[in-house]
Image: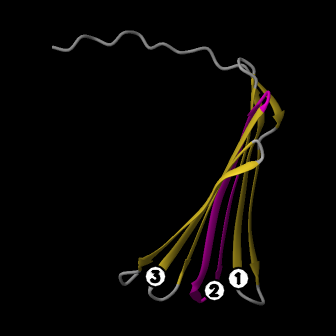
């Protein structure tokens, strides 16, 4: 027989100072003349400082999707995140953006990752892939 679990331990919350508040916005816009509909989502996780070690974190995310009514091959989706962390004399940034489109034969996925250290690029790489639709 297995021993019983001990009572759970809950750590004290991290002391955080908000420097920019959270923000969210969503919109759906349809252009009646073209039939194009755009969905836009912006996610701002704000800026905060973790007081125990002084690291500042800034996170922004977004999603954009569009399609023209009656034209499924016009679809385009984009999702991205940008995260900046800094403390004293160091600063890092990572941004990743993925775009999905399609044609009659394949879904096309392209992802770009950019990383910086102290404002200098240390990585800028793009990956591309075509995925067969297989009757989808």
Q: Residue furthest right?
A: 19
Task: Give me the disc on residue 4.
Answer: none
Q: Which residues are magenta?
A: 61-89
Locate residue 17: give its quadrant: top right
Mark 2 and mark 1 residues within 8 Å of each other at the beta carbon: yes
Q: Secondary structure at mark 1?
A: strand
- Image quadrant assignment for residue 114: bottom right
Left or right: residue 5 compared with residue 14: left
Residue 129 spot, x, y in % from top left:
48, 72
Q: Tell me the CA gap for discs 1 and 3.
A: 22 Å
Bin the neighbour count of mark 2 within 10 Å (Cα to Cα): few under 14, some 14-19, many 20 and up.
Answer: some
Tag shown at residue 106: 3
Residue nearest the viewer, comparing 21 with 54: 54
| Mark 3 neighbour density, 10 Å: few (under 14) some (14–19) many (20 or more) | some
9 sits left or right of 39 in the view: left
Q: Secondary structure at mark 3?
A: strand
The disc, 2 or 1, on the residue closer to the chain's N-terminal end is 1
Q: Residue placed at 75% from the left, 49% from the top?
A: 120
Q: Nearer the viewer, mark 1 or mark 3?
A: 3
Q: Residue at x 84, y 33 (%)?
A: 19
Left or right placement of residue 3 versus residue 123 in this view: left
Mark 1 / mark 3, whichever is N-terminal: 1
- Please name the residue shown 62% across and 75% down the image: 76
Cα–Cα span, label 3 and label 2: 20 Å
Residue 20 is a magenta residue:
no
Q: Position of residue 8 (x, y in %)?
A: 44, 14
Residue under circle 2? 69
Q: Residues within 10 Å of mark 1 (few under 14, many from 20)?
A: some
Residue 47 placement (x, y as % from top left): 78, 37
Eyeballing the image, is 79 above or below 82? below
Question: Picture coordinates of residue 34 (x, y %)?
Answer: 74, 89
Q: Residue beneath label 1, please? A: 36
């Amino acid at each position: 027989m297995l021993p019983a679990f001990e009572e759970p331990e809950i750590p004290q919350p991290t002391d955080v100072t908000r420097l920019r508040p959270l923000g969210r916005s969503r919109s759906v816009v349809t252009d009646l003349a073209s039939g194009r509909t755009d969905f836009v989502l912006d996610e701002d996780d704000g800026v905060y400082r973790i007081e125990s070690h002084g690291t500042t974190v800034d996170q922004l995310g977004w999603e954009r999707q569009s399609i023209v009514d009656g034209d499924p091959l016009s679809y385009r989706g984009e999702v991205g995140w940008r995260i900046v962390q800094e403390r004293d004399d160091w600063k890092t940034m990572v941004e990743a953006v993925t775009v999905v489109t399609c044609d009659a034969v394949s879904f096309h996925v392209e992802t770009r990752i950019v990383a910086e250290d102290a404002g200098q690029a240390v990585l800028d790489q793009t990956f591309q892939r075509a995925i067969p639709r297989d009757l989808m």
